[in-house]
Amino acid sequence: MRLAEYDGKALLRRHGLAVPRGVLLRAGEDPPGAAADWPRLFLKAQVLEGGRGKSGLVRRSQNTSEFREMRRLILATLDDADTPLLLEEAVPIAREIFVAVRVDGTRQRLELLFAPEGGENVEQSKKLARVPIEVGAPGIIEEIFRNAAKLFPRELAARLARYAARLPEIARQEDLQLLEINPLALTKDGRLVACDAKVVRDAAADFRHDPEDFALSRMLAERAMTALERTARDLGFQLVETDGDVVLVTSGAGLAMLMMDLLADHGLRAASFMDNLQDAPDETMNERLKVARMLAARPNIKAIVFQTVIASRSLADRIDALAAWITAEQLPKPLFVGLAAGHAATRTMTAEAAIGKLHALGIPAFTDPVALVRATAQAVGVPGRR
Ligand code: GDP
Ligand code: MN
């Protein structure tokens, strides 16, 4: 779950880290009287995407009299008058720093990242320090300091090390996959203030946290969903619509990503990404097919690719359900099927028999996903690449 900046900063504040004074303004709300005393202001769109500074969604002004104009500019850029805004006191920044802690998925541990230039151009910074972290291990501050001292003056490195050493602990307590502070401001009077926060919490840990928390982020995520994505969620699986020409029906994020890459390698783009939902029914193939049919009816879609991997459940049942779906009503676009089956799945139907059954229905079917994608590319007129 990605948190909006406002919620991310609330989380930091709860853990005792400094953030600028600020107030959340809902659609149409004006600044509170107290903001009139803030010497300079930032007005920031609360959206779940980054790069707001560069797209004109973060604006500064000298005082609240410019507020209405700033708001107008931001909302016009978004073309959405209902987006909540964060009005903040502008912190006088002497230096912008990038600091983040994230789960290193490959090594299965936390890792701290530092860059000496924060702000909007951090991607260009070539000096990124990566420090593996073992939460609770002795000497953690010294280890961070050794790395930070290569990038920052010694005194700042020492302060940063003490600051940064708290982040992995927060990430662990809050079940965060990512906690990124960019910029972390070194103020002109020597304080460290988090001017932005990008926080991603592991959805698998939701049950450990207050479901009422972070209402703003939940509302924004809900609003960002398409109608069909909501339909899919209500049917028990996750759909992300992507800009593409092939409806991809899979289960599990790993298989979906593999297939998206394979399609891209052959000059095609997936129009859908499907994944399982937490606490959802364990079989949602019929629901996925139902949504696939709706997506496939769109004029920009050229084909449907269905790929399944099955080992414990019955291949015969799955093929029967697929055949029923194919014959129920004419498909809006040609269908291509891939199946990888083994072990208990093939007890009553072999993969070869399944392919034969699909061929009898006029559906091209393959046991090799590369052959599947190649055939799809050829059929829709993209010259297949090797
Ligand atoms: P992002 O572009 O979505 O990451 O939005 P940010 O919240 O990081 O804002 C964009 C830029 O505005 C930052 O990189 C800073 O350079 C600047 N900025 C944001 N908040 C403050 C602030 O309180 N004081 C100052 N001086 N600059 C700020
Ligand atoms: Mn930022």
Image: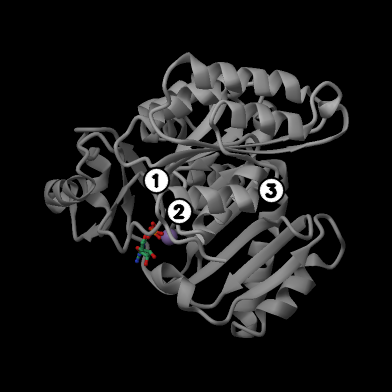
Q: Which mark is residue 245?
A: 1
Instruction: From the viewer's perspective, tell me whether residue 128 is left or right of residue 208.
Output: left
Mark 1: which secondary structure? loop
Q: Which residue is rendered at x = 50% and y = 66% of the image?
A: 191
Amino acid beneath label 1:
Asp
Return the disc, 3 or 1, that comes first in the chain's sequence: 1
Q: How many C-alpha atoms fall within 10 Å of the one at disc 3: few (<14), some, or many (≥20)?
A: few
Q: In x, y percent, where is residue 1?
A: 55, 39
Above or below residue 362? Residue 120 is: below
**In the depicted view, which residue is nearer to us: 144 or 73?**
73
Q: Which mark is residue 325?
A: none
Q: In x, y percent, where is residue 3?
A: 49, 42
Amino acid beneath label 3:
Asp
Above or below residue 116? Residue 24 is: above
| Residue behind mark 2 | 268
Q: Nearer the viewer, mark 3 or mark 1?
A: 3
